[in-house]
Image (tube, helix red, strand yellow):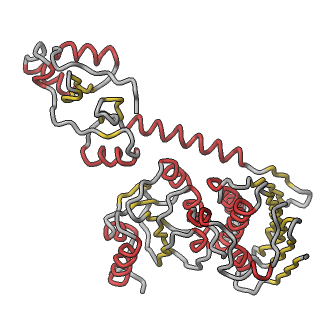
Amino acid sequence: MDPDVVTVGPTQRMREAQQLMRQRRVSGMPVVGDHGLEGIVTIEDIIQALDHGHIEESVGTWMTRDVVTVERRVPVSHAMGVFDRTGFGRLPVLDETGGVCGIITPESILHALLVELNRLLAQDAEHDAAHAVLDHGALRLEFQIAGGDFDSAGLTSVRLKRELANRGVSAECQRRVAIATYEAEANLIIHAAEGGRIVAQLDRDSVRLTVEDNGPGIPDVEQAMTPGFSTATELVRGLGFGAGLGLPNIKRCADHFEIRSAPGYGTKLNLRFDLDADGSGEADSVAESRS
Amino acid sequence: MLWSELLEALEATVLVLGADFEVGSIAAADLLSDILATEKEEFVILTGQTTLPAIRTALAVGALGVVVVRGKSVPEETVTIAASLGIPLAVTDAKMFEACVTAGAHMWNSPSSKS
């Protein structure tokens, strides 16, 4: 919303409202009297006043009294719904005390969304991988994953899936790689306080992922591979993660799955996805736990 | 059942528009882990999660759309990221169970249903 809201008093003349609109380049103004918001006057009201000769009369006489407003704390999507239903061009925004604290228009919403979109794209670019094109045409992408950063979960998956789509990889393969990457990211975020690293190597016929961290390590890898087994906290589960499906799901998606982990030594995954595979074959897998 | 028919049945409010499509199946879960484990195709997600990772989950699994249940307030950031990733997004006041029952009834009775 625009907090620099131009208002007019109900006892002011329509002529003054007209001049104020012209000076401040607005097409409508909330009418605020001693008891707060009393109505709204728009450029259409001014045109009517000029046409019918009451431009010298008070704003309070000709304003629209039945004003639709939105509260400051409601989501913008609610305001968009109101614009959609009513067809109005502006809505006064009220604070917790019922006072006018701003005005919102479809244009201001669009502007705010574009600013937000640019911010998110910039954030995405920041997350962009360090990448290098290798000698034989393969692409190497490296991502650093921050421990505990749940808001960023899935960013690497999105980035990698986009890269695969650009390279013409089938939707089925994109999905398998994206899911496994997402699960690996989530594991690093949940379990490795210092986060970890995902390195992807995109060849013509395969995608290889290496996922490694210096986290606490897994005492019993076989147990960790059991669907439903989880050491995640309730807080993590509340965020939608930690159902104990991560490692089995990664194994399901990959054509080759290898895990090495030991308490105090962190965890390392080596994964391979064959781009020409139909994904239905059994993954060959290696699990190793040092104790 | 078409996406538009599902939204109408759930009396959902559209937050991110998209072209209409056939809904082949539905994955209903609050745990993103459960959604990531699904093997469904041509499906949409019913969830109570409104976070950015929820939208990224939809992209990872190739979901065609997301409906947030329980009338949850969806953060603007989530709406924006759904729009930028091309994921149609809507919100319904229906609770998860009600939404599933309603969606299921329409899906199995829809003239356009494949099943």
Q: List x then y, in percent, for residue A172.
A: 65, 74
Give whichever of B68, A215 is nearer the camera: A215
Residue at (33%, 40%) from the top-left corner?
Answer: A71
* In the depicted structure, whether residue A92 falls above or below residue B102: above
Please report the residue visible at 80 percent of the width from the left and 66 percent of the height from the top: A209
Identify the image quadrant of residue B103. Answer: bottom left
Where does the image place residue B87, in percent across and percent down from the top left? 51, 60
Quarter holding residue A134: bottom right
Side of A279 where A289 appears, left or right: right
In this picture, is B25 found above or below B20? below
Establish if A170 lies above or below A106: below
Relative to A240, does residue A98 appear above or below in the rendering? Answer: above
What residue is rendered at 67% in x and 53% in y?
A: A149
Q: Is residue A3 left or right of residue A61?
A: right
Residue A280 position in % (x across, y down) = 70, 85
Tell me the quarter of the picture where residue A270 sits: bottom right
- Quadrant assignment for the C terminus of chain A: bottom right
Label count reads 0
**Quarter holding the N terminus of chain A?**
top left
Q: Is residue B60 left or right of residue A201?
A: left
Question: A31 or B42, which lies in front?
Answer: A31
Residue A54, position as x, y percentages in the image? 9, 17
